[in-house]
Amino acid sequence: MTATLKAVRSDTSRKMILSIYRQLLREVQKQFTPYNKNPYWKLELIKEFRQNRDASNKELLEKLDQDATDLLSFLRSNRRYGELLTQLDPMHGLTEQQRVEKTANRVGLKVPAGNT
């Protein structure tokens, strides 16, 4: 393989890896950081990518690329599942007391004042 072809392949591979990295950062930002103001997952992701930035072992790079792709797929699926659950189950995310009240209201009853 010529040096030019190797350079083109590594450049394309590098672009794909950076693309996955940016997508992972966006997904982590959407799911974890806004809710609890804790940047742990974002910092951990940055640390992992920086730690393996200079890796040259082809098998290791393929494994890391596959792991990153799998993680991205998992995070997106998990977020989508939460969105669908919220849309399809109106009582998702409510406390037990709120569920009891809504269920009682649905059938035309009111929860006694001592039970609220």
Image: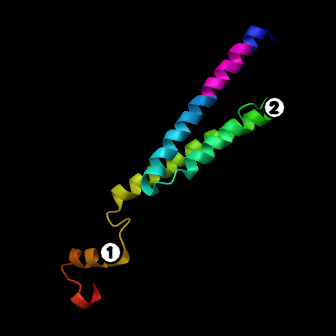
Q: Quadrant of residue 15?
A: top right
Which percent across, then down, holds residue 74?
56, 48
Give the vertical position of 46 relative to 88 (above or below).
above
Identify the secondary structure beneath mark 2: loop
Q: Residue at x 32, y 74 (%)?
A: 99
Q: Nearer the viewer, residue 39 or 111?
A: 39
Task: Tell me the kind of residue under disc 1.
Answer: Arg
- What's the magenta bit mostly, secondary-structure-wise? helix
N-term-proximal mark, 1 vs 2: 2
Which percent across, then down, holds residue 80?
45, 49
Q: Residue at x 61, y 44 (%)?
A: 45
- 109 displayed left or right of 16: left
Which percent across, then down, holds residue 50?
67, 37
Q: Which residues are magenta?
A: 7-16
Q: Which residue is mark 1?
A: 99
Disc sitting over residue 57 in the figure = 2
The residue carrying pointer 2 sits among few (fewer than 14), some (14 to 19) or many (20 or more) residues within 10 Å by Cα, namely few
Q: Quadrant of residue 65?
A: top right
Gap in angstroms between the C-alphas marked 1 and 2? 54 Å
Q: Quadrant of the N terminus?
A: top right
The stretch drawn in magenta includes residue 12: yes
